[in-house]
């Protein structure tokens, strides 16, 4: 970079590739017969069952994957600032699927798998490096952030027509498409009901204008969630489901390394976090479950549960409904809703290390090369948006599970260690 004193280097990287993915089953291009594990009886003798493998697709091919990547690296001010940026787009096409076309049932053969579907992923990674000096304090900070999210580009599925049909059908079809069509949508949408608290009095259930259970609320009891009627038809059904979260794997990951040195002292920290994922508070460790096997949340469930008065209404209102049983079994309102699925975010002080190095003149007198006293800790500080669940569940652990469930997930240990490092 001539004529510029601040730039040390700047590099542009670009790549594009097309690959085949052969992770598909063999001989799909041939028709034939399969020998089943069962038998049929003929004249009292068992014979193995042979069945048609169905129609073959002679034009079947591998899945193709196109990857485009653009990167930009740079260093400024003699290493005072450095960055690496990578942006990518990945398109998977010709993913094999069974056609969902309208063939009559009496067609009599299964259709072959065909190269129909495509989905994509886009994202970026950014890394920054900064080091500097203020008086006697020297420091370095290296933050990074990455993002990735995928869409169904084209998916073999039933998309109902909204033109060329009468108005009522068009509206109904649009409603179905909104809820069920994948094509063109993010691949991690989590559907469920928006809720507005739970019933605290029987009188509120009796006067509730919206039919939640499809039975005029006859089965609803104090403690049941109040689901929001999105389309205003006074009935709760699948049409009232909305996107309440993303999948269990974080779309955003970020972290920062920090290092400070002042005279004999040094401080190192790693902050780390994630967002763009949801956590489902259900399963056997969920706050709803009361069948005796919560490994994480017993205290949590106890402390946050409302209690019932003798008349059946809630007398002490807390964050969660009271325990109720139906036919002797504990009842759990586990329907997917924004009450038990949280769109999560966290920032955590993953590690911190504070050290003091004894003066060289002092260690020399002891005949030692170096002496360092240190205190180190991990996972001691976490900020998250889990609301009432905060502190009882580990947002980092549950972010690693595909469904985002908290089922018996064991939290990260907090550790604090201290010691002396001696160099001879
Ligand atoms: Ca409704």
Image: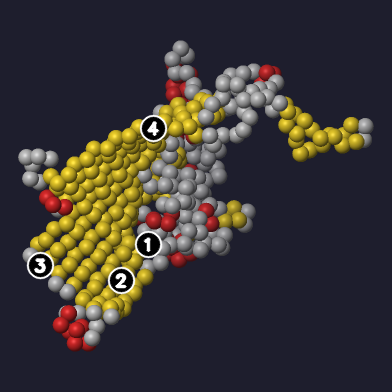
- Residue 176: percent from left, percent from top: 48, 27
Q: CA distance from mark 2 to mark 1?
A: 22 Å
Identify the residue at horizontal 15%, vertical 82% (top origin).
361
* Labels 2 & 3 near each other (Cβ < 8 A): no
For the residues labelled 1 and 3, say whether their Cβ atoms are less than 8 Å apart. Answer: no
Disc sitting over residue 376 in the figure = 2
SS for callout 1: loop
Identity of the residue drawn at 14% across and 46% down: 8
Q: Is residue 2 left or right of residue 306?
A: left
Which residue position holds label 3? 136
How far is the residue under mark 2 from the one under mark 4?
A: 45 Å
Residue marked by disc 4: 17
| Nearest to viewer (mark 1 / mark 3) | 3
Q: Of 360 and 51, which appears nearest the observer? A: 360
The secondary structure type at the circle numbered 4 is strand
Q: Which residue: 54% across, 36% down? A: 23
Q: Quadrant of residue 350?
A: bottom left
10 Å crowding of disc 3: few (<14), some (14-19), many (20+): few
Instruction: Locate the N terminus and report the quarter of the image it occupies.
Output: top left
* Label 2 CA crowd tier, 10 Å (few <14, some 14–19, many 20+): some
């Amino acid at each position: 970079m001539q004529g510029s004193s601040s730039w040390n280097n700047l590099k542009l990287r670009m790549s594009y590739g097309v690959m085949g993915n052969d992770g598909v089953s063999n001989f799909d291009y041939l028709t034939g017969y399969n020998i089943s594990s069962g038998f049929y009886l003929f004249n009292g003798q068992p014979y193995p069952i042979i069945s048609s493998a169905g129609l073959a697709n002679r034009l079947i091919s591998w899945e193709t994957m196109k990857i485009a990547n653009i990167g930009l690296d740079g260093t400024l001010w003699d290493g005072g600032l450095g960055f690496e940026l990578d942006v990518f787009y990945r398109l998977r096409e010709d993913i094999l699927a069974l056609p969902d076309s309208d063939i009559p049932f009496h067609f009599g053969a299964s259709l072959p798998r065909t190269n129909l579907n495509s989905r994509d992923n886009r994202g970026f990674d950014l890394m920054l490096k900064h080091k500097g000096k203020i008086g006697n304090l020297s420091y370095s900070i290296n933050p990074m952030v990455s993002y990735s999210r995928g869409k169904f580009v084209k998916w073999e599925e039933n998309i109902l027509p909204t033109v060329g049909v009468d108005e009522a059908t068009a509206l109904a079809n649009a409603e179905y498409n909104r809820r069920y069509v994948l094509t063109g949508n993010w691949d991690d949408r989590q559907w469920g009901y928006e809720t507005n608290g739970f019933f605290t009095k029987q009188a509120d259930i009796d006067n509730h204008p919206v039919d939640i259970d499809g039975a005029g609320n006859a089965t609803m009891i104090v403690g049941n969630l109040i689901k929001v009627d999105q389309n205003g038809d006074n009935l709760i059904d699948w049409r009232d489901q909305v996107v309440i979260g993303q999948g269990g794997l974080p779309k955003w990951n970020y972290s920062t390394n920090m290092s400070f040195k002042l005279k004999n002292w040094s401080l190192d920290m790693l902050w780390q976090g994630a967002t763009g994922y949801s956590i489902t508070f259900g399963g056997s460790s969920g706050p709803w479950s009361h069948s005796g096997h919560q490994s994480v949340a017993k205290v949590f469930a106890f402390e946050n549960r409302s209690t019932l008065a003798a008349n059946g209404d809630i007398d002490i209102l807390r964050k969660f409904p009271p325990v109720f049983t139906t036919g002797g079994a504990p009842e759990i309102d586990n329907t997917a809703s924004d009450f038990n699925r949280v769109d999560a975010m966290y920032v955590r002080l993953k590690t911190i290390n504070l050290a003091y190095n004894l003066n060289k003149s002092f260690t020399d007198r002891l005949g030692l090369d170096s002496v360092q006293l240190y205190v180190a800790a991990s996972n001691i500080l976490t900020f998250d948006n889990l609301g009432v669940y905060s502190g009882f569940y580990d947002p980092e652990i549950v972010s690693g599970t595909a469904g985002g469930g908290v089922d018996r997930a064991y939290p990260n240990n907090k550790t604090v260690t201290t010691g002396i490092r001696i160099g001879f």
